[in-house]
Image (spheres, grey):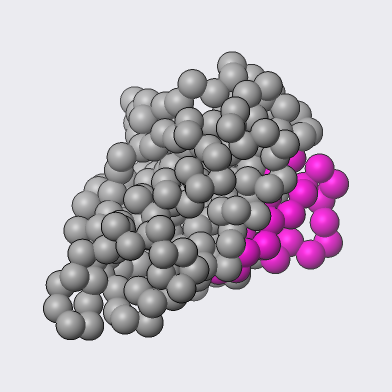
Amino acid sequence: MTERKDNFWLEADWPAPNNIKAGTSTRISGYSRDPYNESNLSFNVGDNPNDVEKNRAALLDYLILQDSPVWLEQKHGGKILSIDKIPDDIKADGSYTTRKNRVCVVTTADCVPILFCNKEGTKVAATHAGWKGICKGIIENTVNIFEHPESMLVWIGPHISSKHYEIGEDVYSSFLDYSITLESSFKKINKRKWSCCLNNIVKILLRNTGIHKIYGSGLCVYERDNLFFSHRRDGNTGRTATMIWIT
């Protein structure tokens, strides 16, 4: 990733068209106090709403955005919606648009933020992929709104790595029930526990749809506590934002 000098915003490092802007925020430089310090961007974690508003406004100013991002009410589901016209119901875990300066955004701590664009730079999408959303088809549902998956570009944002993501039998079974092709993404720890590589899961499912131009930050949010929030590491904590838009 391309880090700005103050690390407030990390630009996605991928060969997207020049008119596509994308990246992720960090926890650095904001108004939120412990345990959300400093730049929490979610209203749904118990933080002071006034602090969240100020954090969002600071990000808007920093990126010189013409329009406010369309913040979703994420539900760990499989729904993705168009924000060409901002809908009344914004309960979804992904959004897409063909409009210039309309910002798709998802917030995460440990889950996987995924950004999509076509090779022409005329359609973009952002998806929040936790284990529940993955097993409800959020990745495939996002790919399906594009016409030619084989020419798409995808960027996988910072998320928890397999070293720090231990799951039980219920989650393990849910993944394999969803797709047996995911079996290589797990390493058995004991009879009832596995380490889980979300990065590998996302890549397998993307390739299953025909996408091969896949890029990523390579950053683990659990390990980079100076930059990112992690629910697994800290319990109740903040969320960063991963965003994409057309200019």
The mark tally for this picture is 0
Residue drawn 58% across the image and 62% down it: 137
241 left or right, relative to 17? left
Q: Which residues are magenta?
A: 76-97
> 30 or 162: which is nearer to us?
162
In the depicted structure, whether residue 157 falls above or below residue 189 = above
Residue drawn 37% across the image and 82% down it: 170
> 203 or 25: which is nearer to us?
203
Which residue occupies the extreme left position in the image? Answer: 190
In the depicted structure, whether residue 192 falls above or below residue 118 = below
Q: Quadrant of the N terminus?
A: top left
Residue drawn 85% across the image and 46% down it: 85
- 228 falls in the magenta region: no
In the depicted structure, whether residue 48 falls above or below residue 221 = below
What secondary structure do most residues of the magenta stretch adopt?
A: loop
Residue 135 coordinates in the image, percent (x, y): 51, 67
Which residue occupies the extreme front position in the image? Answer: 180
Residue 49 coordinates in the image, percent (x, y): 57, 64
- 90 falls in the magenta region: yes
The quarter of the displayed image where residue 21 is located = top right
107 left or right, relative to 95? left
The quarter of the displayed image where residue 247 is located = top right
132 left or right, relative to 61? left
In the depicted structure, whether residue 76 falls above or below residue 222 = below
Residue 80 coordinates in the image, percent (x, y): 68, 56
Q: Is residue 104 visible?
A: no
Q: Is residue 81 visible?
A: yes
Residue drawn 76% across the image and 34% down it: 98
